[in-house]
Amino acid sequence: MRCTAWIAISFILAACGRIDFAPLTTGDGAKMIDAHESDTGGSGMVTYVQDGGNARADGGAQLSTTLTGVRAGDALFLAIDWATNAGLATTTDTQGTSYAIAVGPNDAYARNYLLWGIAPADGNDTISISTDASTGVSFELRVIQIRGVAATGALDATAMSSGMTTSTEAATVSLTTTAANELMFVFEDGSTGPPTAGAGFSTVSTFDGDLSEIRTTGAPGAYIGSLLPPPGTTWSICAATFRTL
């Protein structure tokens, strides 16, 4: 009886500004969403974990690289380029990750792809790419591991761009997000490099002179991915945004 009365008094006092009730949380501190709220995006809390790369210049059609200690639930991004118009044949890894093409092919400078997948298990992981024909004088694979990407329905905006720098102008790409706090991933392939990451971006790979950079967005809307290649660089960009946990 006293408990019921105290609860009633508490709600009256709260309405009068005398008591502040903290938001309900789950056991791990995450806010619970009720029927009157909408979850407009993830936390934006993403962490670069590691990256690896491999390259060949003999026209071979298969390339692999290994990451150690991959954790289940982490996102693996594959930034790939080769020098011919060969098609992407297979993408496999030893942990059984299922990869999807986020962007590509971008054929403005070489042939570029950005792929992604969510690691299903813990452990060392060897990622392999195969093409259906010769890759010519250059075949490059970069794998970047990032923690905090949503496990399902993550891919949102995608875009490609290309150009040539004559002086100190930036290479840019435009994307429009539909959720808050997304991960923006930008992969640049260029004739010289590596470029310098754009304002607000963090470099996650400069393997073989090309740049992969990331940042998190804010409210849904239009965003510009930018970087600064050396003067005289012919460049192409594959970019995408991903919802976060």
Image: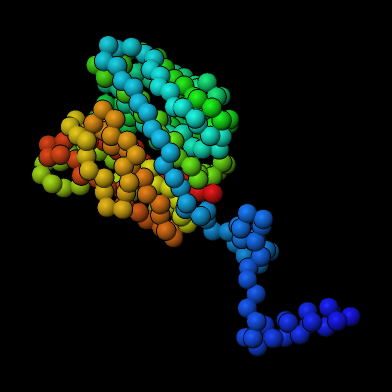
Q: Residue 136: in sight, yes or no?
A: no
Q: Is residue 41 in view?
A: yes
Quadrant into which the N terminus falls: bottom right
Residue 94: percent from the left, percent from the top?
A: 52, 21
At 40% from the left and 35% from the top, the residue drawn is 50
Which quarter of the picture shows residue 88? top left
In the rendered image, the residue lying farthest to the right is: 1
Q: Is residue 69 above or below residue 36?
A: above
On screen, residue 120 above or below 7: above
Q: Residue at x 32, y 35 (%)?
A: 205
Pick the front one: 228 or 236: 228
Q: Is residue 232 above or below residue 84?
A: below
Which residue is farthest left?
Answer: 167
**What's the residue at 44%, 27% (across, down)?**
67
39 sits to left or right of 157: right
Q: In the picture, residue 82 is in which quadrant?
A: top left
Direction from residue 228 to residue 179 in the image, left or right:
right
